[in-house]
Image: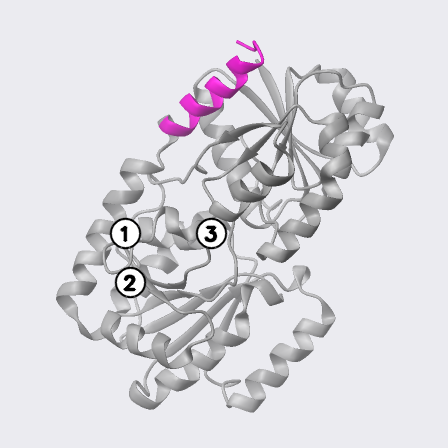
Amino acid sequence: MRVLFTFYVASGGVETLNKLRCEKLQRSGIECHVLYIMPGSAMQHEPAFPVFIAPGDDDIKAVLDMHRYDAIIVTSDFLMLERLRRLGFAGPLIYEAQGLGIRSAAQDLVLEALPFLRNYSNAVLIPPTNHLLELFTSFCPWLQRFVIPNIVDVESFQLTHVDHPCDPVIAWIGRLEPNKNWSEYLKIAHQLLYTKPNLQLWMFHDPELAAEEQKQQFDAELTHLGLQDRLKVFTNLPNHLMPEYYSAIACSGGFLLSSSITEGFGYAVAEAVCCTCPVLSTDSDGVRAFIIHNVTGKFYPLGDVNAAVSEALELMDNTDLRNALREQGRSHMVSQFGAGQYADAFRQMMNYFSIY
């Protein structure tokens, strides 16, 4: 069995997902390839499976003709569905909903994608995210749905012994774009500094994925809050190094803050939980799969900076609760998001199309 995964660019959570599932699925006998339209910051290391950068029709057709895939999974880019059919692919074509943004944006995208889904797609693959399931059930009742939790590398992402700051670190990971709600992180951090003046502030992001307008707004917000000399920014770090940073955050007495409006899954948050790094997050839907309030992590109401500060202080100061969240979070990730579960569910999906 040979399958192809396609996406826009080799970066972000989808690139992480592709790397993990291709490595794990190949161990279970499923040959996996990935095709990106554009290269990205994640193309720094040689993958253990074929990766193609194919921007043009001729490039894509050459890949299709050479490898004769049994099925293709198209992530997010619904225009690719028509493109692949036009280039001659006649096998099962599965649309995968990942990273569609806030609910209103996801709804607009699904509505725009309807004719492509109806004419070219055989099924839709989604993570167990309520708003995505509701949208596809409502607007595409004819379309076969497969719900598979995203795979998380619970083996590589675990607590490691590293040097860590003496003062608590409040970290944020994402893109500088409205849905990730970076400005709320800055506001919460600014408020926390009144109570915890020695806090360290870390942000991890990829400037190549940020619009110029967002970069300007970010710089202006830093200046307005007086954080330009307090914030340490990490750019384009390889994913395999992140367990060291999550571990340093955890051991510093700090936490990861996720301020997103909506998440389809939330890989950064999931990986942090695997490393026993405490998380404080908005209830952004997708993260419900692994955050249970005061059991595996903490929620705060979107937009409520005061509530976020209160939850953050408890997360840092209540040692018994903090330790329980770290232990219970790790246990939950191991039991629910390991490689075996994903491989079994993926093979069942392929069996639906009589691909063995």
Rendered image quadrant of residue 153: top left
Q: Residue at x 61, y 67 (%)?
A: 178
- Kindly report which numbered mark, 3 or 2, lies closer to the viewer in this rendering: 3
* Snapshot quadrant of residue 163: bottom left
Looking at the image, residue 271 lies above or below residue 213 = above
Where does label 2 land, which residue? 250
Q: Indicate the position of residue 231 as horizontal and vertical percent values.
A: 48, 78
Residue count near mark 2 (Cα–Cα under 10 Å), binned few <14, some 14–19, many ≥20: many
Query: Disc 1 marks which residue?
Result: 159
Q: Residue 345: say if magenta.
A: yes
Q: Report the residue marked by disc 3.
A: 266
Residue type at the position of mark 3: Gly
Do the numbered discs 1 and 2 sit on residues whose CB atoms are within 8 Å? yes
Q: Amino acid at mark 1?
A: Leu
SS for callout 2 = helix
x, y percent for residue 331:
23, 44
Q: Considering depth in this image, is 343 or 109 the residue closer to the camera?
A: 109
